[in-house]
Image (tube, grey):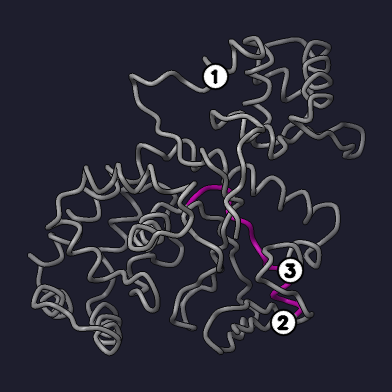
Amino acid sequence: MLRIHFTPRDLARVTLSTKPAPLWEVLLSLHMLQHSDGRLVFDDWRRHVRAKVAPDQMRLLLELTPPRGYSPDFLTPADCPSDFDSALELALSTPRQQIRSQLDLLSKYRPVSPWTRELAQGDRTAMRKLGHAIRTYHDAAIAPYWKSIGTHVTADQAHRGEALARHGVDRLLSSLHPRVRWVAPVLQVLDMHDRDLYLDGRGIELQPSAFCWQVPTKLRDPELKPILVYPIQHAPGILRQSSPDAAKPSDALSSLLGSTRASALEAAVEGCTTTELAKRCNISPAAASHQATVLREAGLITTRRVGASVRHEVTQLGIWLLSGYGSGGSREPE
């Protein structure tokens, strides 16, 4: 069990990421590629990736990312930007000594190739190969699904943010995940190695992830900025490809709901007031209120009062509909 120890200062410095983290999705998706868990959610994606990524590129990445156990922290740097190019540049600019020590640690758990040893020695050619492999993999495995991933992560963040705003940090931490327990002032993460992490006033960032499966994860080095990556709710259709040739979700939704109502549902993903909904959809406040009422009665959004206004947020049913499948889909059993 991982035990994360909070001080009062840490509780005031809990932050929720509002966007998916591209390098965390790269790393965790490489883990998912190496086993068969979550078949209803990931099998179509697995087939797509295996057909698109060259074996030599995949081999380099899999050597650094075993499906269980330690993966080097420099692959997912702390304070990582939310855009892929900047994130990759930050990872590849990790100090050589830090990369060397992390790859030395990896070598204690599994054999490493001459290429990994060259990487540990700071060889520029080896580093360029790594950067090229990560980019090639990202373009095939993550980029086509990024819009869908972003939709689900944003919705998760909106729900967590509501819990934080309405009930405080205790509710947020206690409802984070079934394998996470909040026994103040300690956050217990089950099914992880027995370890204690003392935040010591640094706070912690909570990062939702589409490819994190069943058990939350974190950086190994306790001296790095604390982050806990946790799974969003998984359901078939969560990984929906976006392409110029594919029909946009809004096109399909427009046929089902009408264009204005479909736009209103999409506009509410990040949460909004009625006035904000009207602006996003370019309709009058009265029309926005009507659309919100219809969507709420259909179970696609929730509405709660915040001061003098109300705030609309998409339900899980609404997210499923935005992702291209209806309520008939079943969730993969855990």
Q: Quadrant of residue 240?
A: top left
User: How many labels were placed on the picture?
Assistant: 3
Residue 57 placement, left or right of 7: left
* Residue 326 on the magenta segment: no
Residue visible at 53% across and 41% down in the picture: 236
Residue visible at 22% across and 43% down in the picture: 51
Q: Which mark is residue 12?
A: 3
Residue 133: image x %, image y %?
A: 19, 55
Q: Secondary structure at mark 2?
A: strand
Q: Amino acid at mark 2?
A: Val
Q: Secondary structure at mark 1?
A: helix
Q: Which mark is residue 250?
A: 1
Front position in the image: 173 or 204: 173
Residue 93 placement, left or right of 213: left
Q: Amino acid at mark 1?
A: Ser
Q: Which residues are magenta?
A: 8-20
Q: Amino acid at mark 3?
A: Ala
